[in-house]
Amino acid sequence: MPKMIVSIDEVVIKEVQLTKDRTSLGRRPYNDIVIDNLAVSGEHAVLRMSGGEVHIEDLNSTNGTYVNGKAVKKQLLRDGDVVEIGKYKIQYANEVEQPDVSRLASAGAPLAAAAAGAAGASIRVMSGSATGREVALVKVVTTIGKPGVAVAAITKRPQSFVIAHVEGTSQPTLNGMAVGTEPALLKNGDLIELAGTQMQFVQL
């Protein structure tokens, strides 16, 4: 199934599966893909899916829609194409994903080492009403926090996990140090605090 992978400053913040014939993209909250940034128009662009093909169409936006660096009005998307809107990059993916393990193995890396990777990690809530709850980090991107207050994203990489600040006036802290939009590497036992909630990163 085709999907759009939204990132800013090389940090993935969300993945959206394209399941409808028409998927809208813009700053207004009623869009299917919401990008809350002043460089993005209220109704910026639309993705139209038909017969296995996906076209992107600019809706006369203020700052334009770019595909692979070129301004477009309407364009057929191919696997790997990057749509640029303001500072945001949205990659179109329409290939059956091969697990990292097989790619690493075919390159000569031992399967056991490849499989070890970043598997088996979770976030354990250490304070508040949800104390003791664990959230397994099984997705490529897991967002934590309260939308509109403070949101951070934990991104799963082939051999590690990183955390970055996504939105909100309150920045997350990692072992007492503020985390900005630059990804910070997570290690087993690290303490994260976000919007008054303390959490611990646990890696098996």
Image: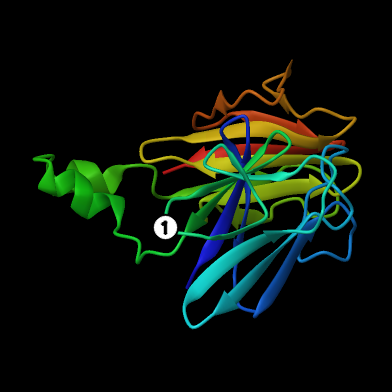
Q: Residue 23's image quarter?
A: bottom right
Above or below: residue 189 compared with residue 15: above
Please report the residue visible at 20 percent of the width from the left and 44 percent of the height from the top: 104
- How dense is the environment of label 1, judged by Cα within 10 Å: few (below 14), some, or many (20 and up)? few
Please report the residue visible at 49 percent of the width from the left and 73 percent of the height from the top: 53
Horizontal side, residue 93 vs residue 178: left or right: left
Pinpoint residue 163: horizontal percent, then vertical percent. 61, 33
User: Going by the picture, which residue comes out furthest to the bottom?
Assistant: 51
* Residue that numbered label 1 is attached to: 79
Q: Amino acid at mark 1?
A: Asp
Q: Which quarter shows the C terminus?
A: top left
User: Going by the picture, which residue comes out furthest to the top?
Assistant: 177
Horizontal side, residue 55 vs residue 116: left or right: right
The residue lying toward the viewer, choosing from 39 and 187, is 39
Please report the residue visible at 43 percent of the width from the left and 35 percent of the height from the top: 160
Above or below: residue 16 compared with residue 194: below
Please report the residue visible at 79 percent of the width from the left and 39 percent of the height from the top: 63
The residue lying toward the viewer, choosing from 113 and 133, is 113
